[in-house]
Image (cartoon, grey):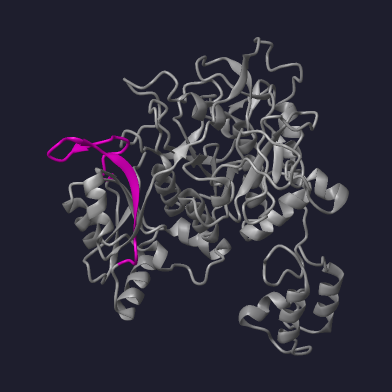
Amino acid sequence: MQGPIWFALASVSVAAAGVSTKEPSFKAGHVEMSGSAQELSTSVWVFFRDKGIVEPEAMRAALSELERVYPARAVARRKLRRTAPGLFDERDLPVSEAYVAQVRATGAQVRVMSRWVNAVSVDATDGQRRAIEGFNCVERVQPLARTAPHELRDVQHVPDDGGGSTADFYGYASEQLHQIGIPSAHSAGYTGEGMIIGVLDTGFHRSHEAYTHSGHAIDVLGEYDWVRGDGNTQKEQGDDPWQHWHGTAILSEIGGYKPNVYVGGAYDAAFYLAKTEDVTREVPLEEDFYVAALEWFEQNGVDVATSSLGYIDWYTQEDLDGRTAVTTIGVNVATENGMACCTAAGNAGHDFNPQTSHLIAPADAFDVFTCGAVNVFGETGGFSSDGPTADGRVKPEAMACGDVAYLINPDDDRGYMSASGTSCATPLVASAVTLLVQAHPDWTIAQLRSALLRSGTIYRATGSYDPNYIEGFGIIDVWRAIQTDFTGDLDRDGDTDLADHASLAACLAGPGVEVGGECVRADLDLDGDADLHDWAGLQNAYWGEW
C-alpha cells in the first residue's frame, strides 16, 4: 500500500513542481499545547491570498511541469471529464512554502496543507492566531467546522439464514440493489471492473468474509489514516472500539462479495481508503482531513469518491450556498476535475416547508450527488434531511435505500445487520455512479448527473423534482441512466438544447467539408462533415432546457 502522494515546489520561485511519495509531516489529529503559558490551542484554517507566484512566466512554467509529472491515470481522467479550462490551473499548485514557514514561525502546529483551497489548517493559540492574521500573505482565518452526527440508526443484527429471505446472488443486499437497477447493470457487464472508488470514513476493518472471499478479496490500492498519520486504516492497538465501525459497514454496500449471502453494488471495483474521522474527540475537527483525502484521491486517478460524513457546526444553513464550507469547495474542485462525488444529505430530518432546510456540508456542493434515504417500499425515512441549498438548488437529489438497509456486521466476520441513515443510502448511489462511469467513461460530470437524476421516479412521473425538497428527483435507476442518449449534446452539459443548436450552426460547412477541432462533435452522423443531416439528427435529439 502506498501513502499519499504530495506535491512540492522545488523553490519559492516556482521553477518546477515535483512529486513526492513521502508521508505528510503534520501531526494529524492532535491538539498541541504551546506558548510560555501552555495555552490551549484550537484548530483553524489559514487561507492565503495567492500561491506566492508573481511572474506569469513562472506560473506557466510551474503548470507545465505539473502536467508532466502528474500521475497518468489522473491526467487521463481529467482529459475525459474535466470541465474547468485546460488540464491544470493555479489551484493545482502547492501552497507557498514561504507562507507556511511564516505560519510555523509563530509556533502554530500545521495539520494539513490544501492546494485546492490554498490554505493550511493549524493548531494555534489565541496569540498565534492574532499574529497569523497580521501577515500580508494571509487572506483570512476561520475555525474548522465540526462533524455532523453520522451514526447509523436502528442497528439490528440479523439471524444467520444464509443470505436472507431473498436467496439470490445478492443475498441480504438483493432488495436494495434491485430497487435502483443495479442487477440489470451487472447483467449487462457493468460491475465496477476497472473503476477506482475512494471512500472517506472512520476506518475500514477488512477481515469479514465478504471482504476475503476466496478469489475475490476486496482490492485496496492504497489507504491512509489522517487521524494517526500512517498508512493503515484498519483497527490498530489503542483505537476506540467504535473507530472502525461506521466505515467498515459502509464499504460493504459497495465492495462486499459473498455470493448468495451478501454482494455489494460495485463489487469488481478497486479502492482507495481514507480514514478521516476521529470518533474519540469530544469536539471532532476533521474537515481538513476530508479535503486532504479528496486531493489524494484525485491525484491517484479515482473515478468516484464517496463519503457518508458531513459538517455543520459552526456553519449555518445560510452558509450552505455551494461556495462557503471548505469541504464544499473541495468537492467543487474535485468534480471540476472529473471525479464524481457522492455525499449524504444528513440525518437531521425534514419538514414540508420548502423554505427551510436541514442539510450538512458538503451536500450543498454544486455537482455532488447528494443522497437521501428511503426504505425498500419507496417511503422516505423520517430522519432524511431536506433542502434546498441557501441559493435555492435542489438537494437532496438521488434517493436510495437508507432506511433498514443491509450491511455487514463490523464486529462479526460472518455476521450481517440492518441499519438506517443517509449514510447507508450514499454508498448505494456511489455504486450506481461507478457503474454509470464504467458504461460511459467519457461522459462529463454534468452528463452523469443528468442521466442519473432523470432516471429518478419523481422525474419520470412529473418531469421535475419534489417541490418540498425532500425526495429530490426520486429513487434512481442506474440501468435506465446507462441507456440515456446524449446525441447532440455538443457542449456536454447534460442536455441537447438551444446552445447546442448554436454550436452546430457555427460549425455547418456543407457536405464534403472536413470538420476539425471543437466542430468534430458537430459531426453527429460521423461522415466527416457537419451538414444538414447532422442538423436533422440534432433536431431529433432535442431535449429542451435541463
Position of residue 520 measured from the top left corner of the image (x, y, whole percent): 67, 78
Position of residue 111 measured from the top left corner of the image (x, y, whole percent): 30, 44
- The residue under the point 30% across, 49% down is 21
**Is the residue 373 above or below the residue 287 in the image?**
above
Q: Is residue 542 magenta?
A: no
Looking at the rendering, the stretch of residues picked out in magenta corresponds to: 23-51
Left or right, 131 with respect to 229, comes to: left
On-image quarter of the C terminus:
bottom right
- The residue under the point 62% across, 46% down is 434
**Is the residue 517 above or below the residue 159 in the image?**
below
Q: Report the magenta stretch's main SS.
A: loop
- The residue under the point 52% across, 14% down is 412
Q: Quadrant of residue 427?
A: top right
Q: Is residue 26 magenta?
A: yes
**Is the residue 49 above or below the residue 393 in the image?**
below
Position of residue 144 measured from the top left corner of the image (x, y, whole percent): 39, 44
Nearer the observer, 211 or 364: 364
